[in-house]
Image (cartoon, coloured by chain):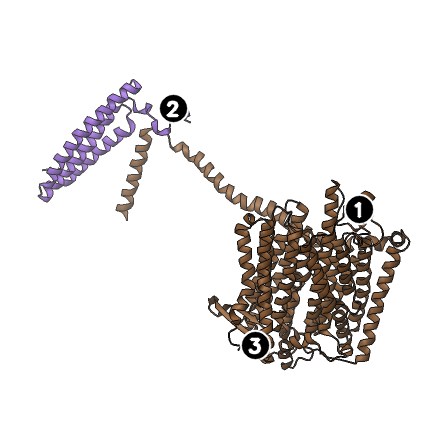
Chain colours: A brown, B purple
Amino acid sequence: MNDGFNFALAVALIPLLPLGGALLNGLIGRRLGAKGSGALATLAILGSFLSAVAIFLQFQQLPEEARRLSFTYATWIHSGGLSVDWSLLLDPLSLMYSLFISGVATLIHLYSIGYMGQDPSFARYFAYLNLFCFSMLTLVLGGNYLVMFLGWEGVGLCSYLLIGFWFTDPAKASAGKKAFVVNRIGDFGFLLGLFLLFTHLGSLDYLALEQGLAGFPVGHWLPTAAALLLFLGAMGKSAQIPLYVWLPDAMAGPTPVSALIHAATMVTAGLYMIARSHVLFSLAPAALLTVAVVGAATALFAATIGLVQNDIKKVLAYSTVSQLGYMFLAMGVGAYGVGLFHVLTHAFFKALLFLGAGAVIHAMHHVYHHVHDHQRDPQDMRNMGGLKAKLPITYWTFWVGTVAIAGFPPFSGFFSKDEILWQAFHTGHWPLWLMGLAAAGLTSFYMFRLLFLTFHGRYRGPEAEAKHFHENPWVMTLPLVVLAVLSAVAGFWGLPHYLDFAHLGNRFQEFLAPVFHRGSDLALRHAAVSHGSAALEALLALVSVAVAALGLLEARRLYLGKPGLAEARAKAHPVLHRRLMNKWFVDELYESLVVKPVAGICEFCYKQVDGLVVEGMVNGTGRLCGWAGSGLRHLQTGRLAHYLTAMALGLALLLVLVFTR
Amino acid sequence: MPGPSHYLLLSVLLFGLGLTGVLVRRNALVVLMCIEMMLGASNLLLVAFGQQAGLPGGQAFAFFSMTVAAAEVAVGLAVVVLLYRWSGGTDIGEVRLFAGPREERP
């Protein structure tokens, strides 16, 4: 242990600082003013980030096998066989998550000062945002599943609060409700998985569970069932088929929230949970295959919907669902570290893209406000166009994000996405590789479509409006620039070995290796990242870049070439276009398969069970007393003689009873 | 010489007569007199049993009871006077205040 560095305190500070910020902002935030409130929240999360960086620097000096520190602060629950502590676990996995969560969150807090400064509820906003950071950091740093679950539910709550932040709009309020309800379905599976693990292994502590699982053979029913239940939780939180439907609707929240919660951090909680449970998942090949198939299917499916959406945030939302699918694909083929690398790079470029979209929306909103137009939608790309010259910083940073997500070298998305595709191919899941490859082409198409529609061509509003555009203030552009730099260079932390000419090594995987090595100790074949033929890997990378280039060229032809080409294409395939526009009618399907039957059962319970049975019993009791009263009141004549007769008869009866016994 | 059973029989007859009178007569004065008759019946029993047991307590109790009865009659007569003032007669069948105010009677 290093002298003078208090790990226990530093780790505890990471979640506690945002919690303090949330409390302060909730209590006195309104008095601080928008800038003060935002600065307080930003400083709180910046403190977390600095603490995480300090830990990272100290961590580098520890030997590899010592990089797993567990801190127990107090007992939470001690009852019978159940004992749960308030404990935090520090290892490369939780540290990696803490670093990028607090780092990206700091930038987004800063950005929010500019974006939400005009909103009257700024203090509530920053309190929620800090509370979210607290929950998320608790989730990743928790030392056992119950602490993780606490954070898990906490982020769900904050997500609900922030999606429905403008709760006076019924559509936004119900989007929040939808997110909450859909997530509950997943959480239900998560909880059942925890119950199963606790019943059979007697603990919820990560370390104890890993030791308990060591005795199980690969493919045993218990790890399989537990892994599938946990994956149900991950599906809900990380928006995978069939529980992805809440994420696109979650775009009702403020755009920085979409960037932080619904793109960069919270939605990767499911990935974290699988990585944290990798011993369990590696014992369950069937569950892993499910993860891989669901991931690949989601990647492709969401990408098809993204092709035709007109709302700039909706495109990014479907792209998030699709990218999360890639990460699950990596997890499913056992390449946990590779999936996590994409989590990291995606956090950078997707946060960048959302913040860029937010900057565009902010600018559009200002212009519409200036010309007193409240009819047009500032998020609809059909109203934009030609913003490149008006918002240069936003454009160039957005460009970096687009190229990164589309997977062109040397930007980060290329390295992380190709590594996933390579692992899928290399482990023999070539149909899944093909799906991922197709999704890569679609991704490139819809991202460049977005870029061209928004920034290129001519402004599609009245000419007079165009001069009202202004680049946003520095608090909004600085995060964009930082994230753009990170999106551009992050890939070099995880160089594939065929490109590693300088022998830098794959820094990212080496950092995470101690976490997953324990998995390979348990004779788990997939856990360690394996390398195949370098030539084949390079060839496949070329193929995927070529596919991405195809997407780019097609988008360029349709949206920068002759006008009307895209509309003609839509007219040529009316059925397909209608299905895509309506998101494959999945919401309608759920409406008729799930919502309507549930509503019908509720209606039945309300009208029949509650209305007839329960109310019948309650009202019946009252009515019975009424009837009895109106019958018996005739005994009460008021005549003294009648009362006396009754008394005498009663006395006589009593005497007879006493004396004849 | 009458034995205890004779006293008992007489007492029961007197009590039953008084009770019947209380139950069936509607004149308040008659009812009061019938109550006195029931009290007399019980006093008779007290004295009779006291004599049989050779204890003076029975007679003492009878005196006590008579005193209370005198007080009771004083109160009872006052009630009858009030009843007369209120209803213009002494018919207790007219008095049905237990059944609530007059206008609400079934």
Q: Looking at the rendering, which quadrant does residue A352 occupy?
A: bottom right
Does the image show residue A587?
no
Residue A466: which numbered mark, if any?
1
Does the image show residue A19?
yes
Residue A212: which numbered mark, if any?
3
Residue for point 73% across, 80% down: A503
Q: How many marks?
A: 3
The residue closer to the viewer here, A196 or A416, is: A416
In the picture provided, is A209 more to the left or to the right than A251?
left
Task: Write down the chain letter for disc 1.
Answer: A
Q: Nearer the viewer, mark 3 or mark 2?
A: 3
Task: Write down the chain letter for disc 2.
Answer: B
Kindly check if marks 3 and 2 are in contact, taking CB atoms under 8 A apart as contact: no
Q: Secondary structure at mark 2?
A: helix
Residue type (three-letter) at the residue carrying disc 1? Ala
Residue for point 87% across, 51% down: A567
